[in-house]
Amino acid sequence: MLSFQRQLAKTAGQDAWMAVVLSGMIIHLMIWMIYSMLNKDKGDLISIHQQTFGKWPGNLLSTIYILFMLLQTITVLRAYIEIVQVWMFPVLKTWPLALVLLLIVYYVVSSGFRVVTGVCFLAVVVPSYLILTFFVPIEFSNFRNLLPVFDHSVTQMALSVKTASLSFSGFELLLFYYPFIKQPEKSQKWAHLGNLLTTLLYLLVVVVTLAFFDQEYLKRVIWPTLMMWKIIELPFVERFEIIGVTSWAIVMMPIICLMVWSASRGIKKMYKIKQRKSLVFLLFICFVICSLLSEREIIQQFNSWITNIGFFIFLYIPFLFVCYHIRFKLKGKGQ
Amino acid sequence: MKKLKIAMICFVIFSAIFFGRVTTQIVDDVNMASAVGYDYAGGDRVKLTTVVPVFKPDKSVGNKTYAASDELSKETLRKLNQSSSRKMVNGKLEVAVYSKELAERGIGDIVDTLERDPSISERLLVAIVDGDAEQLLKEKYGDRDTGVFLSMLIDQNIDSGLVPTYNFHNFLNNYYSKLSDPFLPLIQKNGKYVQIKGIALFKDGRYIQNLKQEHQFVFKALLEKLKLVTYKLKLDEDAFVAIEDINTRHKVRVKKIKGKPEVTVELTVKGIIRESKKIRTSEAAVERIRKGMEKQLEDQADEMIRTFQKAQIDPLGFGHEVRSRMRGFDYKKWLEQYPNLKIKVKTQVDILEKGVIE
C-alpha cells in the first residue's frame, strides 16, 4: 500500500489504475471460487487439501502454504520496520522493534480468533482518517498525467495486473477462518463488499499518485505514499509522514495477526500441536529472520522472492478450485 | 508457568527499552536551520550557508549564519556542527537558494541531498540568487529571520504576484520529466532589500537564461489560473493603462496535421481598468484598450515561446499536453519536432469595469 504504485507504474505507466480495477475483478472471481469450495466442504484449507489430494499429499501442500504465509508475515513486518528506520529513527536497531511488535501479536493471537477480528475491525476504523490525506496532494496534481488511456500493450497490462493483484493478498486467508464465521454462507456478500472497498481505496491512491508524480520521477521514489504525505503541512506538526508511519503500525498489525493465527491454526489441525506452542515457535522464527534481514538490498531481494512465490498462490487457487470440483464430482458418482 | 510468562514479558519490555533507545533531539537543544544557501567554491566544492533563527528574550528573532565548504553537502553539515554549540538539524528548512554561478554548472547533483533526506518538506521553496547566496542570507531583512522572511516573500509573490506556484515537488517533477524543463524564481539582494527579479530557466538542470520581465505575466497565465494580478498595457508612445484584478483561464488544443502536432492555446483574460495615462476611457477607447491588450499579450506570448523553442526548453510543459492527447507518443520524435513546432496563443480579453469615474 505504501509503495505498490511504483511497481505498477513501471510497467503500465499512466494506465496503472486500470490494472487495479482489473485485479479487483479477478479477486472477486477468486473469492467466489473460495466460497464455492468452502460452502461444499464446510471446512478449511486443510480439509479441502485432504479431500482433494488425500491425507499426506494434502497435509504436505498445507504445510508449504503455511510456510509461505510465515515468510509473508516476515516481509510485512520487516517492510514496516524498514520504513520506521528510514523515515523516523535511522539508528534504531531492527530486533527491539520486532520484539515489541511480535509481543503484541502474541498477545492478540493467543487470546483467540475473537480478539483477532477485533483488532482487524479497529485497524480499519481507527486509521480511516488517512483516506483524507490522499485528497491533499490533489492541489499539486495534474490529472492530464492520466491521459491518454489504453495506451499500453496487453502484455504490459498483464504484468501490471500481476503486481497489482499481489497488493490484494490477504483475502485467501478466508480458507482458514471460514469455519469460525457464524452463518458462513451469508458472509460471501460482505467478502465481496470488502473487496470492492479495497479496490476503490487502491484506485483513489493510484489515481492521486499518478497525477501527483511525473512518470520519470515516480520511478525514483521508493515509497510514493509517504512522499505524498510529505506535502501535507499542519500548523502543529511539520512532518505529517511521522503521524502516517505511526498510524501504519495499526494498519499492518492485523495482517500479521491474521496470518500468524491462520498458520498456527493450520498446524494445530494437522499435527495436533497446541496452538499457543506453535505460535511461540512461529513468532520466534519471524523474529530471527526479521533481525537477520539488515540491508535494503537484501530486504528488496527477499521481497521480490516472496512476491514471485505469491503469484503462484494466485494461480494455485483456481487450480485447487478445478481439482476440488472434479474430485467432488467423481466422489458423487462413486457413491 | 505463570511466573515464567511474566518474567518473559518483563524481559521483552526491558530489552526493548534498553536496546531500542535512540538519541533524543529536544527542540530547544537543536539548531533548526530555516534556510540553506549554496555557492560555488571552486573545483567540485560547494559552499553551504545555513541560517538559524535565534529567539531572543525580548521576543525578537535574530539571524545567525554558519558557512562551510566541501564536496558533499552532508559533510559540510558536519563541518558546520563543529562551530555550532547545538546540533544542526534540517527538519524545518523553508527555503533553499542556489547562487547563479552554481546553477550554471548544474544543480542536479546538489539537489540530491534534499531529495534523499526524509526530513525535507516537499513544500520547500527553491530559488536562484543573482549574486552570492552567503551574502544574501547573512543580512537580516524583516522582523523575522532570513529563512522565514524569504519563504514569506516568495509565498506572497506566488499568491498575488507573478511567480508561478512552484515548490520542491514541482521542481523535481519537471527536472526528472523527459518532456518539461524546470524553472525557479530568481531573487536578488538590493542593498538592504531582497527582491524577486524574475524567473530563471533551466535546461537539463543547468541555468541558461532569464525570462524577460515583460513575459512573466504570460508565463504564469499559461501555467495556471491567475488571480488578482496587475498588467501594464502600453498603447501608444506615452499612453499606458493598468489593468487590475485580472482573472485568467487557458485551454490547450492540439491538432495533428500531417503527422505533426499543432498547439493552440486559448487564453481568456478578465480585468478591470484601474489607472490610465493619456487615454480616455470612453466606449471606443475601452474597445481599443481591449484590442490593444489582446495584441500585446499575443505578441509577448509568441516571442516568449519562440525563445523557448530556440533554446530547446519547455518550461510550460507543452510536451505533456501533446503526450496526453496522442497515442503511441514518441519522445525522441517530439524533441526533434519541438523547435519548429507551431504553437499559437489566442487571447480573448474582457474589460469588466473601469473604476468609479468615466
Image (cartoon, helix red, strand yellow):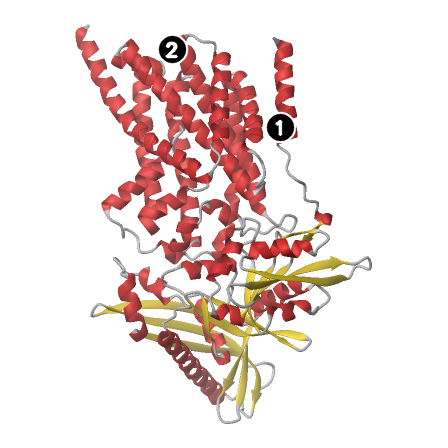
Q: On what subunit does the disc labeled 2 rest?
A: A
Q: Position of residue B330 (x, y in %)?
A: 27, 61
Could you tell me how far apart the alpha carbons at marks 1 and 2 are, in whole angstroms?
Answer: 35 Å
Same-chain status of marks 1 and 2: no
Closer to the camera: disc 1 or disc 2? 1
Residue B108 position, x and y percent, is 46, 61
Tell me the number on the disc at residue B16: 1
In this view, the residue in front, A80 or A237, is A80
Q: Position of residue A282 (x, y in %)?
A: 47, 19
Q: For mark 2, what is the residue?
A: A270
Image side of residue B78 versus residue B327, left or right: right
| CB under 8 Å between discs 1 and 2 | no
Q: Could you tell me which chain the residue with mark 1 belongs to?
A: B
- Image position of A323 with respect to A250: above or below: above
Quarter of the view holding residue A270: top left
Secondary structure beneath label 1:
helix
Q: Identify which amino acid the numbered label 1 is placed on.
A: Ala
Nearest to the observer: residue B333 or residue A118: B333
Residue at 34% x, 36% y: name it. A165
> Closest to the observer: A4 or B130?
B130
The structure residue drawn at horizontal position 38% and vertical position 55%, both measured from the top left corner, is A216
Could you classify mark 2 by the number of other residues whose Cα lies within 10 Å: few (under 14), some (14-19), or many (20 or more)? some
> Counting other residues with Cα less than 10 Å from the Cα at mark 1, is it few (<14), some (14-19), or many (20 or more)?
some
What kind of residue is marked 2? Met
Residue B266: numbered disc: none
Residue at 31% in and 40% down: A161
Measured along the vertical axis of the image, is residue A162 above or below residue B76?
A: above
Q: Residue furthest front?
A: B43
